[in-house]
């Protein structure tokens, strides 16, 4: 009988699994290296010249084909943009995971470095996320430890899960992501462009006037500019500060006109952004070890796939 579950990763898959298990009376604790739940449902905020700027620098919008995910988005207050088929969080994308988290137990800003113990009595050792980075040696400082847990679920990107779970590495080896460099830029005046741009065969994969979304400050001219996979791979290991100018130059090419320099700009690298090769199964679950994995990488590169994967794993665990 499952009484307690630890979930590493508080994105949509982790939240779906946690809500499903909690509804069955199972004690759940989520761990995430971010300061808040959501993963790629993220919003960056900045202050400039007395104005509050904000940018949805990860997922730009969500679609719901199934009733379960549609109900979750409605519960979280998602609003249509830029058309009736797509939904965004209000006043930012990060509002959606915060609403879906509700009263669930989340340990934020924690990097889980090791899982010790045995099936039915797993313990997690974790560090402050500012001290520990994925792929880097664990800090010398003593970790905190939580547990025991009857089961542990991993709802993080497949490459990160493989580092923690060598026994699953072979199963995860075929999963492949494309990375994405994203530039957030605030301008002092409106750009003569449509609210969304998706160029074909270009260095820019997507650009949007983020301030046109519902619940935003429409007087602020905030743009999110996301590079296509090929451009990102060619510049993947460059410093974030060195990405802003060349990606804005590509944006000017899309605009087909010179652009005034932004009043504020920053770049963010998503190493695991667009799913290119999925697992091909809704989840992985080892009932003997009481360890499971879920995420959009199981099914398809859509937010709803992450939700469906987490829900399906929770049902198997329960």
Image (spheres, helix red, strand yellow):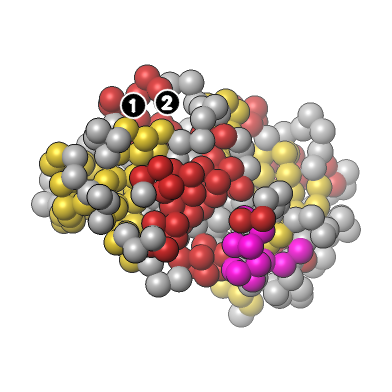
Residue at the extreme bottom of the image, as rendered: 50
- Residues packed near mark 2 inside 10 Å, few (<14), some (14 to 19) or many (20 plus): many
In this figure, which residue is indicated by the disc labeled 2? 172
Q: Are marks 1 and 2 in contact (CB under 8 Å)?
A: yes
In this figure, which residue is indicated by the disc labeled 1? 168
Residue 64 on image: x %, y %: 69, 52
Give the image quarter of residue 45: bottom right
> At numbered mark 1, what does the secondary structure look like: helix, strand or loop?
helix
Residue at x 66%, y 39% (from the top left corner): 227
Residue 163 on image: x %, y %: 31, 31
Give the image quarter of residue 247: top right
Residue 316 drawn above or below residue 67:
above
In front of the other: 98 or 132: 98
Q: Which residues fall within the magenta stretch?
A: 69-80
Q: Is residue 310 visible?
A: no
Q: Is residue 160 magenta?
A: no
Residue 53 on image: x %, y %: 62, 69
> At numbered mark 2, what does the secondary structure look like: helix, strand or loop?
helix
């Amino acid at each position: 009988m499952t009484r307690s579950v630890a979930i590493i990763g508080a994105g949509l898959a982790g939240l779906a699994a946690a809500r499903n298990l909690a509804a069955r009376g199972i004690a759940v604790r989520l761990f995430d290296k971010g300061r808040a739940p959501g993963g790629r449902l993220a919003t960056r905020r900045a202050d400039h010249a007395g104005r509050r700027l904000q940018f949805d620098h990860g997922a730009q919008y969500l679609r719901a084909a199934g009733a379960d995910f549609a109900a979750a988005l409605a519960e979280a207050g998602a609003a249509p943009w830029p058309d009736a088929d797509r939904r965004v969080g209000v006043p930012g994308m990060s509002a959606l995971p915060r609403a879906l988290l509700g009263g669930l137990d989340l340990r934020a800003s924690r990097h889980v470095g090791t899982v010790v113990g045995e099936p039915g009595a797993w313990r997690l050792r974790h560090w402050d996320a500012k001290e520990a980075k994925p792929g880097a040696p664990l800090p010398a400082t003593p970790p905190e430890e939580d547990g025991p847990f009857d089961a542990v679920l991993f709802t993080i990107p497949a490459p990160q899960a493989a580092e923690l779970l060598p026994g699953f590495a072979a199963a995860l080896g075929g999963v492949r992501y494309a990375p994405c460099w994203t530039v957030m830029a605030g301008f002092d005046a409106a750009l003569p462009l449509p609210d969304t741009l998706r160029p074909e065969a270009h260095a820019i994969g997507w650009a949007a006037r983020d301030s046109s979304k519902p619940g935003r400050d429409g007087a602020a001219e905030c743009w999110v500019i996301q590079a296509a996979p090929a451009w990102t791979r060619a510049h993947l290991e460059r410093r974030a500060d060195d990405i802003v100018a060349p990606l804005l130059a590509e944006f000017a090419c899309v605009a087909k006109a010179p652009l005034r320099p932004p009043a504020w700009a920053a770049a963010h690298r998503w190493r695991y952004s667009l799913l290119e090769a999925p697992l091909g199964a809704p989840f992985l679950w080892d009932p003997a070890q009481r360890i499971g994995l879920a995420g959009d990488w199981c099914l398809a590169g859509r937010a709803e796939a992450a939700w469906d994967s987490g829900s399906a794993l929770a049902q198997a665990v329960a």
